[in-house]
Image (cartoon, rainbow, N blue to C red):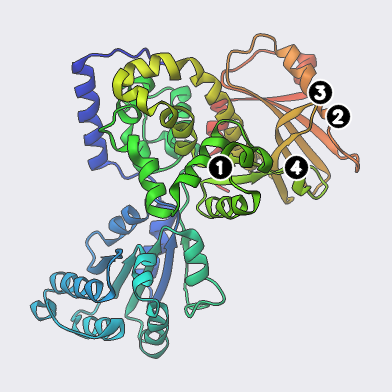
Amino acid sequence: MTKCTLTKQVLTSCVLSVNKILMKKFIGRKDELYVLDKAYKSEVSEFIPIYGRRRVGKSELIMRFLKKKTGIYFVGKKARADLQIKEFLNESSIILKEPLLEGLSVSGWENALTTIVNKWNNNKKRIIIFDEFQWTVEASPELPSVLQTLWDKHWKNNGKIMLILCGSYIGFMEREVLGKKSPLFGRRTAQILLKPFKFQEAGNFHPEYSLADKARVYFICGGIPWYLNSFSGKCSIDMNIIENLLNPFAPLFQEPDFLLREELRDVNNYYSILMAISAGSAVLSDISAKTGIDSRALNYYLKHLIELGYISKRYPLTSRAPSKRSVRYSLEDPLLRFWFRFIYPNTSYIQYAGGAKTFQERIKPELESFFGYCFERLCREALPYLYFKKGVNASFQIGEYWNSQMQIDVVGIRDDNWIDAGECKWGKVRSIKTIVEALKIRMKNYPNPQNQTIAGHIFTRDPVKAGKAILSDITFHNLEDIYNLYDSEI
């Protein structure tokens, strides 16, 4: 890791470079742009829902697609229906250069949409985009039915409409747009679930960094482009943490708080739950004891956090069905994981001691250990790419295993009578022989009633040297190997 030097000049340089990156960088999303461009050029009307968690880049994707095209882009708000319809018409008047639309009084979304489509005087496909669709529907619950009527009666067969509904609430989009009970069910011509970038794509945001530093950024920011753009490749990881996460004036300092308050009610209980999980309370009873929330109510909160993609359920993976008693909860969102581990508990200290002092005293001593846990998750993420590269055609499950005596960091169970078991080491490897011997013992004790073949893997940050006897039994992967796996698209 590059040494952090705290000077006013360096801080200013970092801030300027961050602002420059925020203005210029758009990376990846080639497949998604291809889907949208193909739909635009088609001879039929198109209806494409786009959904994914906040900050994943949905709006940026749409803006990039709209470049050099004419389209009406409307962002839903927490406002009355009549005010939103008025704003929709005003925006349409500017885009379509139809002054008469501005201030036009119409009743309801059906009349508003019909009016702007009729005023649209060109031969190209008419693009209508509702972003943050959930907020518009909250004020106008009838809107999905209105769109169904317009689609079925007028738009579907005229070949002139491209309708895009975009939303950040995955649960809402799956229920109210894609679900069987939705008026719009079965009408989409394509859909895009926009996911965070994987490791290699995220690494492209900071070509100046070493592979290990690219991984460190990924462990903090995940694959969220807005977060990745906040980090400057001209500054060390330490400096980026201080400037972006320990600076009360920086967006990322308040980002998790903003997201949670934007998306959740009764935010104090959610905070308590996330704090408990980040501190190591993984099972329901421990979380309940730590937060003081009754287990029945706790299940409601946990379910909601899972729907938002902030936490996940984990089971010890074996060939048998998992027991409900063995479930653990963990923070799934990397920034939330980092924030609740290091930022939220130190908020007061940051205010009076400053970011640099807080980092040196309360974060840096634990940081590499935290990255070690994140590295385990990265290795599990990489295993499907390893299968693809090897030409594995069998279906599989990826996870981890634990019991009261042992833990296996990476487990892959395939339907071709094969199991992979892996040990992950982010830090310096002092004795590869000791690690291999420990893994072999765990492999031997892993539940395997069907006597499937078990293969061992060692994942390390840096390349390691091992004797031929060890190499014959275990496959080694270092960070560069993992990074290069992503060249193979699944």
The disc, 1 or 3, on the residue closer to the chain's N-terminal end is 3
Image x and y of residue 439, in percent: 77, 23
Asked if the residue under mark 3 is in contact with the one under mark 1, i.e. CB atoms within 8 Å, the reply is no
| Amino acid type, label 2 | Asn
Q: Is residue 35 visible?
A: yes
Question: Circle 3 — which element?
Answer: helix
**Real-space Cα separation, disc 3 to disc 2, in angstroms:** 9 Å
Image x and y of residue 345, in percent: 44, 28
Residue matched to label 2: 445
The disc, 3 or 2, on the residue closer to the chain's N-terminal end is 3
Residue matched to label 3: 440
Question: Circle 4 — which element?
Answer: helix
Quarter holding residue 115? bottom left
* Label 1 environment density (alpha carbons within 10 Å; few <14, some 14–19, many ≥20): few
Asked if the residue under mark 4 is in contact with the one under mark 2, i.e. CB atoms within 8 Å, the reply is no
Residue matched to label 4: 326
| Amino acid type, label 3 | Lys
Image x and y of residue 363, in percent: 44, 20
**Real-space Cα separation, disc 2 to disc 4, in angstroms:** 18 Å
Task: Please identify, in this view, whether the residue under mark 2 or under mark 1 is nearer the observer.
Answer: 2
Asked if the residue under mark 2 is in contact with the one under mark 3, i.e. CB atoms within 8 Å, the reply is no
| Amino acid type, label 1 | Ser
**Real-space Cα separation, disc 1 to disc 4, in angstroms:** 34 Å
Residue projecting furthest to the bottom: 153
Residue 440 vertical placement versus 126 (above, below): above
Residue projecting furthest to the top: 430
Residue matched to label 1: 488
Residue 210 vertical placement versus 87 (above, below): above
